[in-house]
Image (cartoon, rainbow, N blue to C red):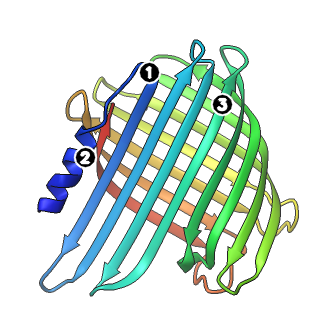
Amino acid sequence: MKSIITMVCALLSTVTYAGYTNESELGILIAKGNSDSESWNAKETAGMKWDADLNLLKFTGRYLQTKTKSIENARYWTLGLRYDRSLNERLGIFIGEIVESDKYAGYNQKYNSDIGARYSLIKETKLTWDVELGYRYTIEHELTGDQKKSNYARGYTETTKNWTESVSTKFWFEYLPNLTTASDYQMNSELSITAALNNVFSVKTGYLLRYDNLPNAGAVAKTDTLLTTALVAKF
């Protein structure tokens, strides 16, 4: 209990400056007794805007770990840094780097380098809809010790709907056709609903799906799903 209180207090310790935003998520599940399992899920998004909001630098991070009877059966983390430049009210360009790890999916580390354009189809107070089109270069370090390099096209769409002042939903979908090996395409998607508790805290439930049509050696399935409920602090 003390560790949980400490983590919640850490969320409150963030200081907000003009042009800076921060959103932290924390989800914990601990079962004892007839069942013995433990799950931790944390997510961080921090952004900085400048020059009349024409420039955006955004950091993202996520960590997931689950154990059953003290034996780890899932561990996934990702770190990302992305720069966006607005060309006008609707059109922008971006460049970014993502590092991720998931040994249960057959790789120790994966480096994704992205470049592309973003366009806002709908930009209203209660509804937004954006699309992205770009290119991704991936270097993957597999558990076997092999290194795999791939070229992907990248299509992405994201929509957010504010149903009321306190309830909103978000959906995004990403498609990555492999330009090097056609059968090794990937798809990722997430649907989430957020209910605000006050101006800072909210509760978020999300369903994340990751699909790899040609998984690495050591992976037992093509599809990974994650259903989470987390406390969110937004500054």
Question: Where the C terminus falls, by quadrant?
Answer: top left
Q: Which mark is residue 10?
A: 2
Can you tell which of label 3 and label 2 is closer to the viewer?
Answer: 2
In this rendering, the answer to whether 172 lies above or below 28 is: above
User: How far is disc 3 from disc 1 in space, using C-alphas?
Assistant: 23 Å
In this rendering, the answer to whether 80 lies above or below 216 is: above
The residue at which mark 3 appears reads as 84
The local secondary structure at tag 3 comes to strand
Q: Quadrant of residue 13?
A: top left
Please, which residue is most extreme toward the right here?
180
The three-letter amino acid code for the residue at tag 2 is Ala
The local secondary structure at tag 1 comes to loop
In this rendering, the answer to whether 15 lies above or below 185 is: above
Q: Nearer the viewer, residue 159 or 45?
A: 45
Q: Residues within 10 Å of mark 1 (few under 14, many from 20)?
A: few
Q: Which mark is residue 126?
A: 1
Residue at x-position 30% and y-position 83%? 68
Residue at x-position 66% and y-position 68%? 212
Q: Position of residue 151 (x, y in %)?
A: 83, 58
Q: Position of residue 183 (x, y in %)?
A: 81, 70
> Is residue 168 in sight in this rendering?
yes
The three-letter amino acid code for the residue at tag 3 is Asp
Q: Earlier in the sequence, mark 3 or mark 1?
A: 3
Q: Does residue 125 appear to the left or right of 228 in the view shown?
A: right
Q: Position of residue 202 (x, y in %)?
A: 26, 39
Q: Tell whether label 1 touches label 2 (CB within 8 Å).
A: no
> Is residue 215 in sight in this rendering?
no
Q: Nearer the viewer, residue 201 or 53?
A: 53
Q: Does residue 38 appear to the left or right of 102 in the view shown?
A: left
Q: Does residue 224 appear to the left or right of 107 in the view shown?
A: left
Residue at x-position 76% and y-position 42%? 115
User: How far is disc 3 from disc 2 in space, using C-alphas?
Assistant: 28 Å
